[in-house]
Each structure stands twice: as structure tokens, then as C-alpha cells.
Amino acid sequence: MKGIIDRFEGESAVILVEAENRELLVPKKELPSDCKVKSAVIVEESAGKHNPIIQLDPETDQKKKQVSSDLREALLNRKKNSKLKKKK
């Protein structure tokens, strides 16, 4: 299943799993080292293990970044008087 790291609370990460409408609390040490808030992850739960296996989901992460970038670009290129200024 897929999830998003919502926040860190002490030594745990809170992962939101939207498809199941629930939160998972996972120890930070169980996460890949490059995980951060808003990272897309794949969660694999197995009956024999107490903690799920967490992997980064680079494909979903890249899609989110592209959508965000596209929206920002569209806002900056609007013809109306925008309060956002282009960097030169």
C-alpha cells in the first residue's frame, strides 16, 4: 500500500495511508535514511513482523514534484497582475 510521511513525533514517523484511512506509527530507524516529511512511501505489512517494511516511492514522489512545479509555473506565467514575482 502507498502512504505519505505526515510528520515525525519523537523517535517515530506518522505515515498516512489514505486508501485505508488510517495512520501508521513507525520507528524512525525502520525508515530509509533519506525519508523526510511529505515523502511518498510503499508500506509492506506482513503477518510475522511487528513493524512494516517501508520503501521510498520515487515514482509517486516525482509526480508530486512535477505537479507542484507545473502549478507554480502556471501561476508565474499568468497575464493578470500577480503578487508573485518571477526570479530573474
Image (cartoon, helix red, strand yellow):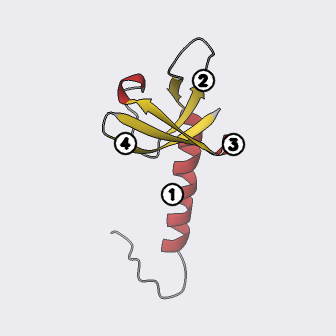
Q: Say whether marks 4 and 1 touch (CB < 8 Å).
A: no
Instruction: Decide which of tag 3 and tag 1 comes sooner along the chain.
Output: 3
- The residue that appears at 42% across and 27% down in the rendered structure is 31
- The residue that appears at 51% across and 26% down in the rendered structure is 54
> In the rendered structure, which amino acid carries the disc numbered 2?
Glu
According to the picture, the residue beneath numbered tag 3 turns out to be 19
Picture coordinates of residue 67 (x, y %)? 58, 55
Q: Which mark is residue 69?
A: 1
Q: Say whether marks 4 and 3 touch (CB < 8 Å).
A: no
Q: Say whether marks 2 and 3 touch (CB < 8 Å).
A: no
Gap in angstroms between the C-alphas marked 3 and 1? 25 Å
> In the rendered structure, which amino acid carries the disc numbered 4?
Phe
According to the picture, the residue beneath numbered tag 2 turns out to be 44
* Local SS, label 1: helix
| Residue farthest top in this picture | 48
- The mark total stands at 4
> In the rendered structure, which amino acid carries the disc numbered 1?
Ser
- Along the line of sight, which residue is nearer the eye, 81 or 61? 61
* Local SS, label 3: helix
- Along the line of sight, which residue is nearer the eye, 68 or 29? 29
Q: Which mark is residue 88?
A: none
Instruction: Decide which of tag 2 and tag 1 comes sooner along the chain.
Output: 2
Gap in angstroms between the C-alphas marked 2 and 4? 20 Å
- Which of labels 2 and 1 is toward the front? 2
According to the picture, the residue beneath numbered tag 4 turns out to be 8
Gap in angstroms between the C-alphas marked 4 and 3? 21 Å
